[in-house]
Image (spheres, rainbow, N blue to C red):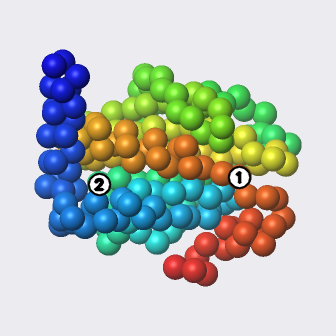
């Protein structure tokens, strides 16, 4: 009985998803969710279970996709972003993961260095990767998760998940878990790998 009640509560939350996620209808969301959308960006490929936007610039070294697909960064309900970081042999390369996350929050994400992050883990590239989770109440209440990913050849990427506060937790978890577990590293120097750094040509 407890299991049925728990399942019922989750289904009720998920049924509210279309109302909270803007104009998309429940039928549209279900149809899109059954056909994941795949991206190839900055040496990685991943899937979103909903129809996200074409890639768009986030920072000088970053790229993002957002939901709804017609939203702009800053007006979105959900966002997945990748930010290219210096290799270990370059400037800032000697910073630890913790120091890099602090630098990113302050320089790229508008966060405060004094903000105390929470801890979070997700399955990324076949392993558990620890990250930081933040809640920013103003000017627009949002949930953020920040992870650092180490790739072949010394490349490092920051992976940023962002959700508007009104997005139900089960939906947030479903979308971000899908993206995280679908992440794959493209073979270095392959055609797909090279094209992933020229994402703006396919918008």
- Residue 60 located left or right of residue 151: left
Residue 161 sits in quarter: top left
Please tell me which residue is depicted at 43% across the width and 23% down the height of the picture. 118
Q: Secondary structure at mark 1?
A: strand
Place residue 134 in its image quadrant.
Answer: top left
Q: Which numbered disc flags the more N-terminal residue, 1 or 2?
A: 2
Q: Nearer the viewer, mark 1 or mark 2?
A: 1
Q: Is residue 43 above or below residue 179?
A: below
Indicate whether 169 appears above or below 60: above
Q: The N terminus appears in which quarter of the rendering?
A: top left
Q: Secondary structure at mark 2?
A: loop
Q: Residue at x 53, y 44 (%)?
A: 180
Percent x, y of residue 158: 60, 45
Q: Between residues 115 and 202, which one lies in front from this camera angle?
A: 202
Residue at numbered disc 1 = 185
Q: Specify the quadrant of the image occupied by residue 50.
A: bottom left
- Residue marked by disc 2: 77
- Identify the residue at image location x=21%, y=45%: 14
Task: For label 1, count other residues whose C-alpha is less than 10 Å away and answer few (under 14), some (14-19) or many (20+).
Answer: some
């Amino acid at each position: 009985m407890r299991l049925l009640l728990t399942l019922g509560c989750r289904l009720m939350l998920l049924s509210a998803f279309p109302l909270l996620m803007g104009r998309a209808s429940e039928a549209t969301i279900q149809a899109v969710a059954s056909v994941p959308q795949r991206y190839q960006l900055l040496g990685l490929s991943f899937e979103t279970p909903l129809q996200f936007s074409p890639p768009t610039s986030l920072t000088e070294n970053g790229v993002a996709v957002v939901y709804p697909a017609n939203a702009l960064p800053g007006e979105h309900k959900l966002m997945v972003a990748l930010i290219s970081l210096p290799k270990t042999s370059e400037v800032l390369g000697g910073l630890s993961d913790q120091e890099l996350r602090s630098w990113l929050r302050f320089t790229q994400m508008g966060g405060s260095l004094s903000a105390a992050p929470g801890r979070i883990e997700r399955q990324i590239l076949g392993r558990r990767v620890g990250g930081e989770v933040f809640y920013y109440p103003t000017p627009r209440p949002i949930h953020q998760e920040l992870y650092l990913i180490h790739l072949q050849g010394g490349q490092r990427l920051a992976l940023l998940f962002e959700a508007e506060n009104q997005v139900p937790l089960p939906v947030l978890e479903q979308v971000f878990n899908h993206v995280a577990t679908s992440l794959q590293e493209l073979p270095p120097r392959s055609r797909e790998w090279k094209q992933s750094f020229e994402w703006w040509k396919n918008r």
